[in-house]
Image (cartoon, rainbow, N blue to C red):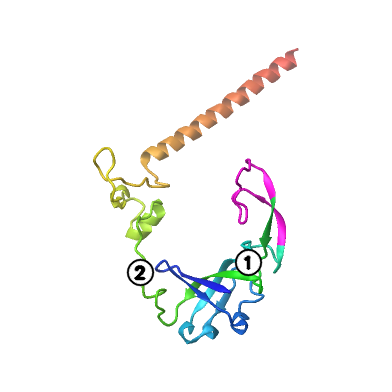
Amino acid sequence: MKINISNPKNGCQKVIDIENENDLRIFYEKKISNIINISSLGQEWSGYIVKITGGQDKQGFPMVQGVVVNKRVKLLLSKGMTGCRGFGMKDGERSKKSVRGCYVSPEIAVLNLKIVKEGNEILGLTDLEKIRRFGPKRSSKIRKLFRLSKKEDLRKYVIEKNKIGNSGQKKQPKIQRLITPISLQRKRNRLLTKKKQMEKAKKELRDYTKILLKN
């Protein structure tokens, strides 16, 4: 079985191949989101605690959270769900697909783990720092990165791309979920328009009811 261990702190990951069946027993009958101590895998993994995030069997069928079995089952899945890519499917259409349950069994070929607590330093997993190409786009994540308050303007903190557009300036990503005075004004206008439409519909209903009562 191959074990894919990822480190969310620095973005690195490492794949190890375990052939000894006794070493794999700590994973059997454990399910997705369970936390395990993997010190028994060797001296280098001493003190490491990991969380199971997923996996796939020898035929490539993925493990799905919520399917409480350790074998393969067939489910009706919608487009975009785990195990259903949805090529050629229409909106709202569901298809019967085979998926693996959330419990780890000997039939699993690749198991995905995420480090919760680190131990000794491991070459290629904890000693490196993976450089990110782009900065965050969501407003809450930009505030968290630069420790900004909600009143500060985020547009001057966006990390520019090393690419020049047609205007001769560097390209800048659009900030997602950015709240500005203009966006608040548009929201107020939308709510006001909706309120007017509801009042108009109620008035028309009252007038129509009066006409019916007269007749």
Q: Residue 26: percent from the left, percent from the top? A: 61, 80
Residue sitting at x 63%, y 40%: 90
Q: Is residue 58 visible?
A: yes
Looking at the picture, how far across and down is residue 19, in whole percent? 58, 80
* Residue highlighted by disc 1: 57
Residue 74 part of the magenta-drawn span: yes
The quarter holding residue 88 reads: top right
Indicate the position of residue 51 as horizontal and vertical percent values: 54, 72
User: Is 66 colored magenta in this rendering?
Assistant: no
* Location of residue 99 by image quarter: bottom right
State how far apart marks 1 and 2 are (Cα): 31 Å
Majority SS type along the magenta span: loop
In terms of secondary structure, where does tag 2 sit?
Answer: loop
- Which range of residues does the magenta coloring cover? 73-95
> In this rendering, would 24 be left or right of 135?
right
Q: What's the residue type where badge 2 is placed?
A: Glu
User: Which residue is identified by label 2?
Assistant: 129
Q: Amino acid at mark 1?
A: Asp
